[in-house]
């Protein structure tokens, strides 16, 4: 029998079966020796003594370590204008990490009422100029603005604590009634209202709220192919003098020329360089996690 993992708390797995039922399950003993399944995994299970036992999970189309999810269609990167303030560096890193895993990034600006219109316009111009979609939650008063985008897809909301992920989910679907908390003024960051990853059914697809985080995991990122996954770079891939161009110090690099012309934002390119520096010198850092400020 087949099911979709929609929630994991400790060793307890919650599955949605093919006929729409929600059941609890445990891992088969043999699976505890290997990589454990995560939310978004399609699994095969057997009923043993009235208990669902997960035997294996299907091949994944993609997988994120942080947040721990599989088979994702798109990621809604939620960034607030204030409390915490919008960080281009953080947003850029999330975009690049998401795209490396062949997942579509969407940028959602929250708390826009705390910023002036010029600031919102600058954010939109910055990312739309490079081919990314940007949404301003302040323009919408119902779920209709995202309904078509979310329909039939597994969408993950990610971002720092306190940016309003749970608030946005409640706006999309008020029946969720997710807990939200205020920002800690002393630390200028939100309290963790989401403690685990969970999928919520919505218009034929699923929404995933995730715990806030301060670091991303670069374990799966390959420095040799990173640039070819980035939407802002794709029009120029293959146009450099050298086929194995890293787009760093090489002469006649099409991506560096695009940066000079302003087609690719200089600070976005700088984020790429900082990630490449880490990947090329990971032994010096001693850890494959990089803190996101």
Image (cartoon, rainbow, N blue to C red):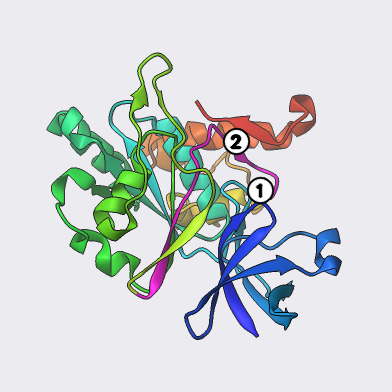
Q: Secondary structure at mark 2?
A: helix
Q: Nearer the viewer, residue 264 or 112?
A: 112
Residue range highlighted in magenta: 204-220
- Residue placed at 70% from the left, 45% from the top? 219
Relative to 57, 204 lies left or right: left
Real-space Cα separation, disc 2 to disc 1, in angstroms = 10 Å
Relative to 146, 49 lies left or right: right
Q: Secondary structure at mark 1?
A: loop
- Can I make out residue 256 in this image? no
Residue 207 lies in what quarter of the image? bottom left
Where residue 123 appears, as percent x and y from the top left, is 27, 37
Where residue 129 appears, as percent x and y from the top left, is 29, 46
Residue to which mark 1 is pinned: 221
Residue to which mark 2 is pinned: 275
Depicted 44 relative to depicted 224: above or below:
below
Where residue 100 appears, as percent x and y from the top left, is 57, 53
Q: Nearer the viewer, residue 149 or 272?
A: 149
- Can I make out residue 215 in this image? yes
Q: Is residue 131 magenta?
A: no
Furthest residue toward front:
49
Position of the N terminus by quadrant: bottom right
Where residue 126 appears, as percent x and y from the top left, is 30, 39
- Residue placed at 66% from the left, 48% from the top? 221
Q: Are marks 2 and 1 in contact (CB under 8 Å)?
A: yes
């Amino acid at each position: 029998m087949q099911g979709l993992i929609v929630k994991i708390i400790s060793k307890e797995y919650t599955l949605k079966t093919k006929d729409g039922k929600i059941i609890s399950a445990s891992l088969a003993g043999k699976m505890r020796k290997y990589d454990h399944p995560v939310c978004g995994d399609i699994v095969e299970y057997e009923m043993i003594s009235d208990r669902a036992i997960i035997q294996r999970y299907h091949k994944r189309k993609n997988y994120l370590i942080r947040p721990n999810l599989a088979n994702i269609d798109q990621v809604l990167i939620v960034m607030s204008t204030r409390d915490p303030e919008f960080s281009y560096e953080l947003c850029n890193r999330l975009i690049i990490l998401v795209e490396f895993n062949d997942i579509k990034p969407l940028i959602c600006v929250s708390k826009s009422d705390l910023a002036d219109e010029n600031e919102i316009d600058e954010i939109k111009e910055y990312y739309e100029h490079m081919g990314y979609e940007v949404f301003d939650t302040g323009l919408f008063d119902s779920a209709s603005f995202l309904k078509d985008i979310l329909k039939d897809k597994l969408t993950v909301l990610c971002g720092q604590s306190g940016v309003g992920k749970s608030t946005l989910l409640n706006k999309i679907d008020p029946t969720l009634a997710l807990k939200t908390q205020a920002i800690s003024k002393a630390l200028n960051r939100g309290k963790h209202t989401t403690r685990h990853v969970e999928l919520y059914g919505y218009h034929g697809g699923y929404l995933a709220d995730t715990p806030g985080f301060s670091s991303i995991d670069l374990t799966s990122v390959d420095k040799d192919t990173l640039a070819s996954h980035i939407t802002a770079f794709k029009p120029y891939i293959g146009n450099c003098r050298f086929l194995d161009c890293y787009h760093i110090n090489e002469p006649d690099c099409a991506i560096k020329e695009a940066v000079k012309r302003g087609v690719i934002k200089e600070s976005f390119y700088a984020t790429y360089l900082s990630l490449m520096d880490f990947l090329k010198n990971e032994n010096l850092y001693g850890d494959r996690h990089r803190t996101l400020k």
